[in-house]
Amino acid sequence: VLFVGGDSLFANKVTLLGSTQEISIELLESGKTKIFNTDEIFSITDNKGKETILFKPFKEDNLDFTIANMRLFIKGEQYSDKHSAWFAGMLSLGVGFAAPILMANKLNPFYSPIPVALGTAFIGMTSPSKRRAKRLYPKLSSDPYFLEGYTMNGKARRINSSIRGGLI
């Protein structure tokens, strides 16, 4: 099962639940059953290699997400997962350690989470460099759908890393 967000799962059994837009997936490694909305799933490939596409094409922000374009978008998300966002986490970790000490001297320590939240907001406003994608993936980087998936997922990873670093 390949999700629109680039993640994938290996399943024993996939079942469409009645007339609803939900699919029941029995996970291969744990045997647990999870239910997903069909809008979250791009395709399902059976053990013989036959792929069933569940994705419905749409338009958003001057980008026409056809099946081929969405494949490139998902590939961009998957390639972005290969790179860590350690700098955002370390920056938030440093701010998270320094904020209570600095706030204790000037203000009430109750306000110490504010610099961490502001730092995360600042990191969320920046975008990952497209130059890195162009350098690492020269053939794919000329495609706007690949770059969009790469930068969107990279930005989400930076924000998550920043939040985790600030919580430690």
Image: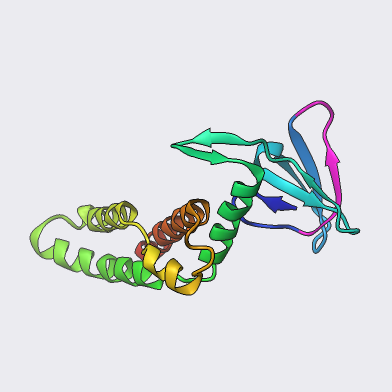
User: Image quadrant of residue 52?
Assistant: top right
In the foreground, 105 or 88? 88
In the rendered image, the residue lying farthest to the top is 19
Tell me where residue 43 appears, x and y as whole percent: 74, 48
The residue lying at 15 percent from left, 63 percent from top is: 104
Residue 54 vertical position relative to residue 109 in the rendered view, above or below: above
The residue lying at 31 percent from left, 56 percent from top is: 126
The residue lying at 63 percent from left, 36 percent from top is: 57
Residue 149 vertical position relative to residue 36 in the rendered view, above or below: below
The residue lying at 54 percent from left, 70 percent from top is: 82
Instruction: Specify whether 16 is left or right of 58.
Output: right
Instruction: Specify whether 54 is left or right of 101.
Output: right
Mark yes or no: residue 6 visible. yes
Residue 130 vertical position relative to residue 57 in the rendered view, above or below: below
Give the quarter of the figure containing the C terminus: bottom left
Colour scheme of the rendered structure: rainbow
Mark yes or no: residue 4 visible. no
Question: Magenta part of the protein: which range?
Answer: 10-20
Tell me where residue 36 appears, x and y as whole percent: 71, 42
User: Image quadrant of residue 29?
Assistant: bottom right
Tell me where residue 132 appears, x and y as whole percent: 41, 70
In the rendered image, the residue lying farthest to the right is 48
The reply to whether the magenta stretch includes residue 111 is: no
Tell me where residue 51 appears, x and y as whole percent: 81, 51
Q: How many marks?
A: 0
